[in-house]
C-alpha cells in the first residue's frame, strides 16, 4: 500500500537555539512492557544479523554459499531463510547485497542528489511513500537557556530490529533516540543514558518504559507507519544543526545522500565538514535518518552507534521498501 507524503510541522521556527536537557534521574516503572517471548525473538534475530554482517564483511556478498553461510551462523538453510524473511523481508542473497559495503553506491542514483529531486517533485513523490511519517516541533526558548531546567524527560529501553533502543521524550515529543551496546546490558544502558543526559544537564529524568513502549512501536513497526499516526519529535540544537536535521528528513527510505550534496542543498557548498559534524550530533537516530548519509564514493562513514548497525539499518530498509 502506498501512503501519502509525510507531514512536516514548522512551529516557532524563528527560535535560533532550541534546547538542551539533562541529568537528574528519578526511578519509576521500568518494566519494558513488551511480551517477553517477542522481546527475546527480536533480540536474538538482531544478534544473528550482526553475526551475518560480520561473516559477509569477511567473505563478501558475491560468492555467498547458502550452506556455508547458514552453518557459520549455527543455523540450517531453512532457518537462515526464515531469519531474513522475518527480520527484513529479504532472501539471504538479497540481504547480503543490501548490507554490502558498496551497496550505498547504488543508492546514489546517477550521481543525482535526491535532495534536488525531492525539492523539484515535492514530498508527495513515490520515493517518500514507504517512509516513516514525522512531525517536528520547536522547544520553548527558555528550555535551551535553562539547559532543560524545570523539564521532565521520560525515558526507557525498548527492543528494536537493531538491538535495544533508548528513547527520551518530553511533553512535546521524542527528544532522543539511540541504541544500547549489547556487550553488557546494564553497563550499556548506563553509557547510553549518560550520552543523552550530558546533552541536557539540568532536566529531570523519569524512567518509564511503559510510556516509551508505544513510541517505540510507532517507530520500529512499519505496519504502524501512517499519516494519521505520525511520530512527533523535538529537534534540540543550534539553528544550523536544526537546518541540517530538517534536511535529513527529506532523504527517503531506500536512498542515500552525500555530505557534499547536503552542504550544497543548504547553500553552504564549502561546509561539508561542518555539515558532517551536525549529522554526527543528530540526537534522534533512525527517525531523523542520518544513517542515509554516506561519503562521496558511497563509502559508509562513521555512525555514532556503529557502522555495522548502519549497514543493518540500510539493509532492513531495503527489505521494507521491497515489501510495499
Image (spheres, rainbow, N blue to C red):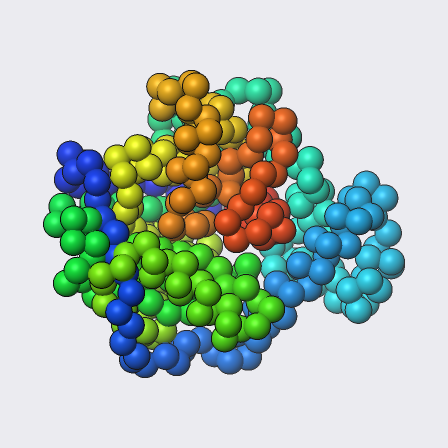
Q: Position of residue 115 (x, y in %)?
A: 43, 26
Identify the residue shown where x is 36% and y is 73%: 209
Side of 83 relative to 109 (left or right) = right
Q: Position of residue 86 (x, y in %)?
A: 62, 61
Q: Give the camera-side residue of 276 and 298.
A: 276
Q: Position of residue 109 (x, y in %)?
A: 58, 25
Image vertical order of residue 218 relative to residue 38, above or below = above
Q: Position of residue 15 (x, y in %)?
A: 16, 38
Side of 20 relative to 100 (left or right) = left
Identify the residue shown where x is 77% and y is 54%: 55
Side of 244 relative to 85 (left or right) = left
Image vertical order of residue 96 relative to residue 81, above or below = above
Q: Is residue 217 visible?
A: no
Q: Is residue 305 visible?
A: yes
Q: Give the camera-side residue of 113 and 201.
A: 201
Image vertical order of residue 191 relative to residue 235, above or below = below
Q: How many marks?
A: 0
Q: Give the camera-side residue of 186 and 100.
A: 186
Identify the residue shown where x is 51% and y is 36%: 293
Identify the residue shown where x is 52% and y is 28%: 258
Q: Quadrant of residue 74?
A: bottom right
Q: Quadrant of residue 119?
A: top left
Image vertical order of residue 16 relative to residue 92, above or below = above
Amino acid at each position: 500500500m502506498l501512503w501519502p507524503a509525510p507531514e512536516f510541522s514548522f512551529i516557532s521556527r524563528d527560535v535560533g537555539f532550541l534546547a538542551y536537557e539533562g541529568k537528574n534521574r528519578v526511578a519509576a516503572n521500568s518494566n519494558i512492557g513488551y511480551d517477553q517471548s517477542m522481546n527475546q525473538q527480536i533480540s536474538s534475530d538482531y544478534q544473528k544479523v550482526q553475526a551475518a554482517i560480520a561473516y559477509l564483511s569477511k567473505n563478501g556478498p558475491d560468492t555467498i554459499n547458502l550452506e556455508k553461510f547458514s552453518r557459520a551462523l549455527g543455523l540450517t538453510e531453512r532457518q537462515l531463510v526464515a531469519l531474513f524473511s522475518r527480520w527484513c523481508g529479504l532472501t539471504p542473497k538479497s540481504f547480503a547485497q543490501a548490507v554490502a559495503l558498496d551497496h550505498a553506491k547504488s543508492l546514489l542514483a546517477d550521481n543525482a542528489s535526491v535532495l534536488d529531486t525531492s525539492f523539484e517533485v515535492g514530498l508527495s513523490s513515490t520515493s517518500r511513500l514507504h517512509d516513516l511519517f514525522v512531525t517536528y516541533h520547536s522547544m520553548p526558548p527558555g528550555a535551551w537557556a535553562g539547559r532543560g531546567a524545570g523539564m521532565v524527560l521520560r525515558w526507557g529501553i525498548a527492543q528494536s530490529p537493531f538491538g535495544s533502543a533508548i528513547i527520551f521524550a518530553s511533553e512535546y515529543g521524542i527528544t532522543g533516540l539511540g541504541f544500547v551496546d549489547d556487550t553488557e546490558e546494564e553497563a550499556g544502558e548506563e553509557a547510553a543514558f549518560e550520552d543523552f543526559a550530558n546533552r541536557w544537564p539540568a532536566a529531570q529524568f523519569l524512567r518509564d518504559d511503559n510510556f516509551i513502549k508505544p513510541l517505540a512501536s510507532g517507530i520500529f513497526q512499519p505496519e504502524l507507519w501512517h499519516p494519521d499516526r505520525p511520530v512527533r519529535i523535538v529537534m534540540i540544537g543550534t539553528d544550523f544543526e536544526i537546518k541540517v536535521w530538517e534536511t535529513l528528513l527529506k532523504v527517503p527510505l531506500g536512498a542515500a545522500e552525500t555530505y557534499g550534496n547536503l552542504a550544497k542543498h543548504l547553500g553552504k557548498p564549502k561546509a561539508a565538514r561542518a555539515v558532517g559534524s551536525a549529522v554526527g550530533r543528530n540526537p534522534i537516530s533512525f527517525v531523523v535518518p542520518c544513517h542515509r548519509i554516506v561519503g562521496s564514493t558511497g563509502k559508509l562513514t562513521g555512525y555514532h552507534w556503529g557502522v555495522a548497525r548502519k549497514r543493518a539499518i540500510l539493509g532492513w530498509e531495503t527489505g521494507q521498501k521491497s515489501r510495499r
